[in-house]
Amino acid sequence: MATKRPPPAASSSLVKRSRVEDEDGSDAAASSSLVPITSSRDGKDKGLVRSVKRTSGLSDPILSLNGGHQGEILDVKFSLDGEYIAAAGGDKSISIWKTYSPNNHVTSLQSHNKAVICLAFLPPSTKTINGFPSSTSSLPLLLSGSADSTLILWSPLSPPPNNKLRRFRHHKGIVNCVAPSPADATLFASGSDDGDVCIWNTEEKQPLESLKVGYPVTALEWTKDGSGLFVGGIDNQIHLYDLHRKQILYSLNLHTDTITSLTLSPSGSYLFSFSLDSTLRVWDVRPFAISSSNGDAAGEVNEEDRASQERLYRTLSGALNGADALLIKGGWSRDGRRIILGSGDRTCVVWDVESEKILYKLPGHRGTCTAAAYHPKEPIVVSSSTDGQLLLGEIEP
């Protein structure tokens, strides 16, 4: 049964982060105390504090959220209204934090028997679940997937035992990914090491259907209209499944290692994928027809290669998968112009998509940055790490 863990050890502290050009401060967030902001890039004038133009409603430009977990954090998400943060821990728990001051550790959700791997907030709905209202801005609902092979639907702001709404059992392996449908707030998909992709209704304990992919599934994302599902796994490819016709529409095959993250842009036109090959690719997934005129002179055409080349929009480099080979995750900015991603070099990386340039390489973590996310309304980002802390801060809009 889910219980509320008291949060006396949890705390937030002000720390420094640098832009990609900065030369010092790579471990600035390691301290739980205030780190002075230097006035020069070589760090000599440490007694001077530079005025910082504020860009958000955070109490401080950078905050370290500590004490929510006893060990690594594997995923982090903002609630859809941006008021709360949820973090998935290797210690079997989920921590819930307030985004804005005071940055309290609100509660911990505990019911999984093994590490919590993935999280997703449900979009708002007017329906009820177990007699409780579905996700609203004041009472969001949260899905979690775990190494114990189950998923749980939570009302994280409700007092226990009412915060645990339903447990979903079907998978026979680690649940690596969960994705709510953008078209129906009661539908979501999950992917597992058992090779199944399951489509669920939040009101049913068993899946509505199961796609037998045949290999471990590590990343999922819906199409904008909810009719299709992008599936990534250890076959190094991304397959778009048409859920109505029960067939693969096309595959994207330019990665050379396991897919760790799939995220659709706010417009629904572009999909980004990250892989253990340390490349981030942005794909044009609008439903245009692939030209049949491409191919070699002999007329031998590899349909998957052609689809991949024609749909590839940008290739972004600068993030590393890390020696621990974790499923590193990221997200889009609300305007679709930027992407943020965790990295194995203890940073999180922010790119401008059009120019393919790195805007920030944000330091502060002491272990692999496992996940990073953009706030849905303000220029705020959050990142999680194997070091057990969350870094929350503002950047330039």
Image (cartoon, rainbow, N blue to C red):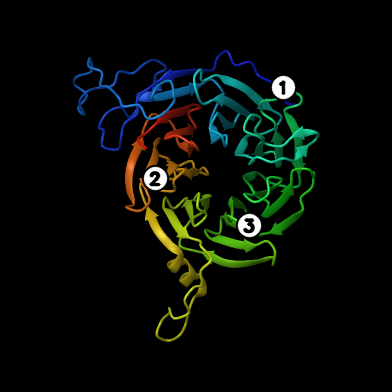
User: Is residue 71 depicted above or below 129 in this figure?
Assistant: above
Whether residue 363 can be seen here:
yes
Tags 2 and 1 touching, CB below 8 Å: no
Q: What x and y, as percent, mark residue 146? A: 66, 38
User: Mark 1: few, some, or many residues within 10 Å (few <14, many ≥20)?
Assistant: few
- The first of marks 3 and 2 along the sequence is 3
Query: Amino acid type of disc 3?
Result: Tyr
The residue pinned by badge 2 equals 319
Q: Secondary structure at mark 1?
A: loop
How far apart, in angstroms, are the residues tagged by discs 2 and 1?
39 Å
> Residue visible at 30% across and 35% down?
19
For label 2, the crowd category at 10 Å Cα-Cα, with few meaning under 14, some 14 to 19 and many 20 or more, is many
Q: Position of residue 131 (x, y in %)?
A: 80, 33
Which residue appears farthest toward the top when viewing the image?
8
Of the residues tagged 2 and 1, which is closer to the observer?
1
State the residue position of label 3. 215
Quarter where residue 150 is shown: top right
- Secondary structure beneath dot 3 equals loop
Q: Is residue 326 left or right of residue 309?
A: right
Please indicate whether residue 158 sits to the left or right of residue 290 in the image: right
Give me the residue at 38% from left, 56% from top.
Answer: 315
Task: In this rendered view, identify the residue nearer to me: 63 or 67.
Answer: 63
From the image, which quarter does the C terminus lie in?
Answer: top left
**Residue count near mark 3 (Cα–Cα under 10 Å), binned few <14, some 14–19, many ≥20:** some
N-term mark: 3 or 1: 1
Q: Is residue 254 above or below residue 43?
A: below
Tell me where residue 14 sits by quadrant: top left
> Of the residues shown, which amino acid type is indicated by label 1?
Pro
Q: Which mark is residue 159?
A: 1
